[in-house]
Structure formats: structure tokens, C-alpha cells
Image (cartoon, helix red, strand yellow):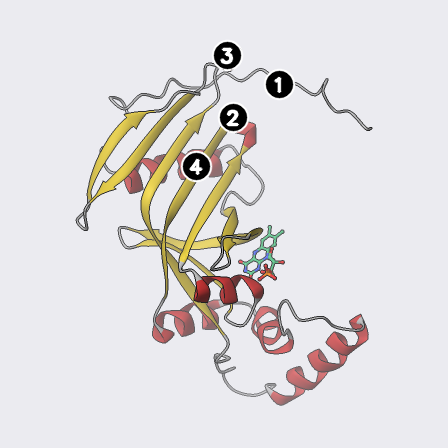
């Protein structure tokens, strides 16, 4: 068996406590996201997104956070992909930001809904030409026999859409995770890590804050 048991880091970060975080977890996320950018972490908006089938089989993959506010956390993808099929069966998800260089993670859980086509179009149109074409080319998550099929389709789509605005593909758009639980985790010495959990109370935006044992 290959062992990696000797890979061991000591963590030490700012002390985190329910009393010294923002009462609003989105504002707390703002602060930590700004610190992740300032620390020049690679792709600080990359999050591991977990979804599951109706009967509870989980799967995960990285996606990029593209917007967040009091309404939730937004990412964009292909609506016929495996993740989207799972969201269709079970509209809840968890997203994890692995900010390991800061000895931090943020974990979001909540209900998932599609963003409006208007919002998807707005974001789609802001993407570089190559990314817009890419969305037309890929049947994300489908088995494909070779790379050359992708390249051929890329050339076709590039030709088809060489003039004017590229339309939003029907099968492409955004999802919003509406959080009901957000955990901020800060690594500390001797594995006595700080964990602050925000839980949303009812349907309004009041949040309970609690410390969890590491
Ligand atoms: C850093 C990183 C960022 C990614 N961002 C996205 C994204 O924003 N949207 C997306 O659909 N796929 C993104 N991917 C690809 C996904 O991880 C995944 O391969 C793809 O969405 C298909 O997943 P599925 O088959 O589980 O639906 C990203 C991959 C990496 C490594």
C-alpha cells in the first residue's frame, strides 16, 4: 500500500469565534474571499460542488463561483450534464472552497435553482469568444470517441457563429445555491481548529451562529 501518512502540516490562523465574525455569513464570505484573493491563491473562486442522485449516491467536481449575494452562490454549467441531471432529481447541493494555503475552508449547503435565462445570457455574453463557442461544442458528460470530434465541431461552430452575437445555447446556464448552512473553518495549532456554523432560521435571512468542535 502507498502511504502518505507522513504528510502533516501544522495550521495556525486568525482566531475565529461566533462572537468575532459578521452576523451575516455573506458579509463574512466577502471578507474571507477578499483575503483569499489578496493571498493570491490560485482560482480562489473554484469550489468543489457535490450533488447526488434521488437515492443519495453522491458525486462531485470543481466549478467556478461567478457571483454571490444575499440570494445565493451562482455557477454556470451545461444543463444536460451529469451534475444537472442530479440537480434535477435532487435540487440540493454542497459547495466547498478549499483555501488550503490559508488553512481555511468554507462549506455551503442549500437548495439549488436555475438562474433566469436573462442572467445566464448576460454572463454568457461576457465570456471570451472561445468559451462561448465551447459551450456550443460540448455535450458535457456524454461519452465521446475522440478529441478530433470536438475539434471538428469547434471549427463548425466557429464558422457558424463568426458574425454577430453568439446566442445562448438552450442547454447552458447558471444555477444558484440558496444557502441554509454555511461553515467557516480555520485551521489552528494542535488540531484545535475553529469552526463557525451559520444556520438559516426559517425562510428569512436571520442566521444562528454556533461553534462546532473540530
Ligand atoms: C478549476 C476548475 C474549474 C471548473 N469550472 C467549471 C465550471 O464553472 N462549470 C462547469 O460546467 N465545469 C467546470 N469545470 C469542469 C467540471 O469539474 C466537470 O468536469 C464538468 O462540469 C462535468 O461535470 P459532470 O459530468 O459531473 O456534470 C471545472 C474544472 C476545474 C478543474
Secondary structure at badge 2 equals: loop
- Give the residue at mark 4: 106
CA distance separating discs 4 and 2 = 11 Å
**Nearest to N terminus: mark 3 or mark 2:** 2
Q: Are marks 1 and 2 in contact (CB under 8 Å)?
A: yes
**Nearest to N terminus: mark 1 or mark 4:** 1
Residue 147 image point, x, y percent = 79, 71
- Give the residue at mark 3: 189
Residue 54 image point, x, y percent = 47, 60
Residue 5 located left or right of residue 61? right
Res. 1 image quadrant? top right
Front one among 80 and 116: 80
Residue placed at 52% from the left, 87% from the top? Answer: 164
Residue placed at 24% from the left, 38% from the top? Answer: 24
Where 51 sits versus 29, above or below? below
Label 2: few (<14), some (14–19) or many (≥20) C-alpha neighbours in 10 Å: some
CA distance separating discs 3 and 4 = 19 Å
Q: Are marks 1 and 3 in contact (CB under 8 Å)?
A: no
CA distance separating discs 1 and 2 = 10 Å
Residue placed at 37% from the left, 75% from the top? Answer: 117
Residue 138 image point, x, y percent = 64, 73
Amino acid at each position: 500500500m502507498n502511504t502518505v501518512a507522513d504528510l502533516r502540516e501544522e495550521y495556525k490562523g486568525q482566531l475565529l469565534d461566533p462572537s468575532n465574525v459578521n452576523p451575516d455569513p455573506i458579509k463574512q464570505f466577502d471578507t474571507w474571499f477578499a483575503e483569499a484573493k489578496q493571498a493570491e491563491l490560485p482560482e480562489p473562486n473554484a469550489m468543489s460542488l457535490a450533488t447526488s442522485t434521488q437515492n443519495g449516491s453522491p458525486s462531485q467536481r470543481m466549478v467556478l463561483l461567478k457571483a454571490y449575494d444575499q440570494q445565493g452562490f451562482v455557477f454556470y454549467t451545461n444543463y444536460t450534464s451529469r451534475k444537472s441531471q442530479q440537480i434535477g432529481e435532487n435540487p440540493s447541493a454542497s459547495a466547498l472552497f478549499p483555501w488550503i494555503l490559508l488553512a481555511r475552508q468554507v462549506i455551503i449547503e442549500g437548495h439549488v435553482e436555475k438562474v433566469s435565462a436573462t442572467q445566464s445570457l448576460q454572463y454568457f455574453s461576457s465570456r471570451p469568444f472561445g468559451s462561448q463557442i465551447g459551450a456550443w461544442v460540448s455535450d458535457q458528460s456524454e461519452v465521446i470517441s475522440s478529441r478530433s470530434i470536438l475539434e471538428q465541431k469547434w471549427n463548425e461552430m466557429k464558422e457558424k457563429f463568426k458574425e454577430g452575437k453568439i446566442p445562448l445555447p438552450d442547454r447552458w446556464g447558471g444555477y444558484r445555491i440558496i444557502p441554509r448552512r454555511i461553515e467557516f473553518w480555520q485551521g489552528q495549532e494542535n488540531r484545535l481548529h475553529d469552526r463557525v456554523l451559520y444556520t438559516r432560521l426559517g425562510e428569512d435571512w436571520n442566521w444562528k451562529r454556533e461553534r462546532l468542535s473540530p
